[in-house]
């Protein structure tokens, strides 16, 4: 739907012209009247195909007519420097770069507060899913007491593909790379770092506190077909979750594989889709499902943020300032039973399946330590939390 | 999250003090600073428990200090009259009454346009799920090409309960009534009229056209355990769907049971929850899941609308005016194969299970006609569309 305004359209500079950046440019040009894409920052040595392209960030950040800087480059530097300079110069920032936001959330918020510039981050978590906006809306009425879910399309695709086609992990990863769902260097996805950044950002927004970046983080790198088979014997499958809980002035967060009951909604999330849930006092549980990655859905989220900036319709994150009053981080809030498949000795455990053990009622931090210990003896060890059965 | 404004808080009058109305009052009093609940319209003969209670709508509609009228009474009259008068008097209207909005959408929009008053209807569809807002947000960028899903918690609970506990329809309905999920007169739920109103409203907002109210509508009144068993043999279960499609200046809508593949997300929606999906060109498919009914979730949606009104942040629906340019209603856009279980003769069909037949590739309107014909011979006949298998 084209929208119309009578004031001067906001001028946008786009940093980065990869899959997401190209989609942002196309959507702005073809579908949105209320902002104008005025500049596109390219890598040095680019082949010019649009008069708006430049390889000089100086030109952009010093241009007083640029109102919004939209960053789709990824990586920590120079994204961190560029966004900080944009915010200090009073330019609103919209970014899809979860790594840089998770690492420098407080710096960005402080810079924006000084100049009055907005920071919008919808595309950092859940691609096209209106997840950050969903949290922000719920918070107008409720305190968010927990969130959890599938926040990484690559790992969901890998597990889905292993189950559907009976392939092993390496083969499924290769297929994900072929399809463009996984990077050539897949560690950020399969070791949980991508979900960790998304969890830090979600917790910061949901719980109104600058979330620790020291999150217990495990991935699915060591998941085997045999693991999936024995979880299946117990009516479960494996999904990589980010989650957080908040109560009584304390919060906890974790990133880890969860052996979810086969009858759960999450177990039926196919391909590279995401599904993320929040719980609030009056709203109960809300779930949001959609494409967690990909050029168009992620660009859609970026453009939604740009439209909100243009309409002056966005919350701020004073909670994310380094000097804001903080909730207490208390790992004890996130407890579960864990299954660990390993050749290492696991004390205080019961047998789950041959070669796999259950450790009951430990925190996510204790579970992560347990896995790290086991990995020293058996580098193929795999661990998953035992997700709760649906109470309905 | 308490929010703060420096201007005079908007004054709200609440019409109706049932389950939803009471929750709205409690949420406004306890959780929202930017509006003030100033009056509560009760039925004549009420027992006063709050100084704000009155049984005079005249007092409310003639009070120039009342900014927003919030209706949670239900039913067509006097809700229709009250809301029309409020809008004509320039009072913003927020309502959870899907029946009255579906029936008088054009009248309400015209009245609001004349006076500049807003009409907000989030709570009419999907209870606490941000569904109407989700459509409106997606439309800022995309044309919505289709929507579908579970929009009625009562019928979802009945089918869920029949499957989980092996009870028959009457028993499951009785349990739903005990739990307060179903009305004593359950026709609106089990015959699909409730979903019909929600479908009309969703289509009007999603497709930017005043949707016909002549929607082919079938319910689940005749669903038996045996039906569920034979669908289960085919890897399916039954869910009552509202759906709509829109393409090339044409649209179609329908309300009918769908035999969904057991591996679909919708088949795993438990208890009285709802799950509704939309598809747009750049966003792809988004799904929204949550409590489709109940005091707190529905009241949450009402209060979200009130907050948006207070902040001046809401779209209008010129599309819903009776004299707005309309899309063409073309039933041919919604085609499927249908299974009909009946003792009546079904021409041009193949056998699905003993006593049940498949009719291939007909429209929802033709299917409804087929069922109406069969019901004349066999009043227990049941029909469901065959939902597509996931292509992922």
Image (cartoon, coloured by chain):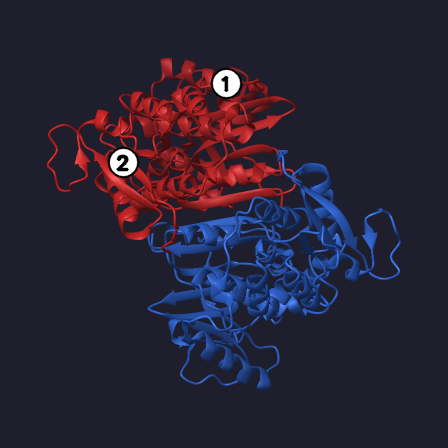
Chain colours: A red, B blue
Tell me the number on the disc at residue A14. Answer: 2
* Figure disc tally: 2
Is A218 on the left or on the right of A284, as rendered?
left
Q: Is mark 1 on a helix, strand or loop?
A: helix
Viewer-proximal residue among A368 and A235: A368
Q: Is residue A305 left or right of residue B311?
A: left
In whole angstroms, how far apart are the C-alphas of marks 2 and 1?
39 Å
**x and y percentages locating residue A181 in the rendered image:** 28, 39
* Residue picked out by circle 1: A365
Residue B154 sits in quarter = bottom right
Residue A15 at least partly seen = yes
- Image check: B237 left or right of B332? right
Determine if residue A180 is in view: no
Residue at the (48%, 25%) spot, across then down: A254
Mark 1 falls within which chain?
A: A
A120, A66: nearer the viewer: A66
- Name the spot of residue A368 as percent of width and height, x first: 46, 19
Indicate which disc residue B172 carries: none
> Residue A166 occupies which quadrant of the picture?
top left
The chain that hosts pointer 2 is A
Along the viewing direction, whichever of A48 and B370 lies nearer the viewer:
A48
Comes first in the chain, label 2 or label 1: 2
Residue closest to the eye, A58 or B366: A58
How many other residues sit within 10 Å of disc 2, few (<14), some (14-19) or many (≥20)? many
């Amino acid at each position: 739907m084209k929208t119309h305004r009578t004031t001067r359209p906001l001028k946008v500079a786009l940093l980065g012209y990869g899959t997401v950046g190209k989609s942002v440019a196309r959507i702005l040009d073809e579908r949105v009247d209320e902002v104008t894409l005025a500049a596109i920052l390219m890598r040095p040595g680019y082949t010019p195909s649009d008069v708006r392209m430049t390889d000089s960030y100086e030109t952009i950040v010093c241009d007083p007519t640029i109102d919004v800087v939209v960053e789709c480059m990824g990586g920590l530097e120079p994204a961190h420097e560029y966004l900080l300079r944009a915010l200090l110069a009073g330019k609103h920032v919209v970014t899809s770069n979860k790594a840089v936001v998770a690492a420098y959330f407080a710096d960005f918020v402080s810079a924006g507060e000084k100049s009055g510039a907005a920071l919008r981050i919808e595309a950092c978590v859940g691609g096209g899913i209106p997840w950050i906006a969903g949290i922000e809306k719920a918070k107008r009425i409720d305190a968010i007491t927990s969130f959890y879910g599938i926040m990484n399309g690559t790992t969901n695709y890998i597990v889905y593909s292993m189950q559907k086609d009976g392939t092993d992990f390496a083969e499924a990863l290769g297929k994900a790379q072929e399809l463009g769902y996984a990077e050539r260097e897949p560690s950020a996805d399969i070791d949980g770092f991508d979900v960790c950044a998304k969890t830090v950002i979600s917790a910061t927004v949901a719980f109104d506190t600058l979330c620790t970046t020291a999150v217990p983080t495990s991935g699915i790198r060591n998941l085997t077909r045999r693991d999936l088979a024995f979880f299946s014997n117990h009516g479960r499958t494996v999904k990589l979750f980010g989650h957080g809980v908040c109560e009584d002035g304390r919060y906890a967060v974790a990133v880890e594989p969860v052996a979810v009951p086969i009858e759960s909604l999450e177990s039926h999330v196919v391909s590279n889709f995401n599904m993320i849930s929040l719980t609030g006092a009056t709203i109960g549980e809300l779930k949001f499902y959609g494409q967690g990655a990909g050029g168009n859905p992620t660009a859609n989220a970026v453009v939604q943020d740009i439209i909100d900036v243009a309409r002056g319709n966005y919350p701020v994150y004073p909670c994310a300032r380094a000097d804001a009053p903080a909730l207490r981080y208390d790992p004890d809030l996130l407890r579960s039973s864990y299954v660990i498949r390993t050749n290492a000795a696991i004390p205080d455990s019961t047998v789950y399946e041959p070669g796999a053990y259950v450790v009951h009622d430990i925190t996510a931090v204790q579970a992560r330590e347990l896995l790290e210990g086991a990995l020293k003896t058996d580098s193929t060890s795999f661990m998953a939390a035992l997700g709760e059965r649906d109470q309905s």
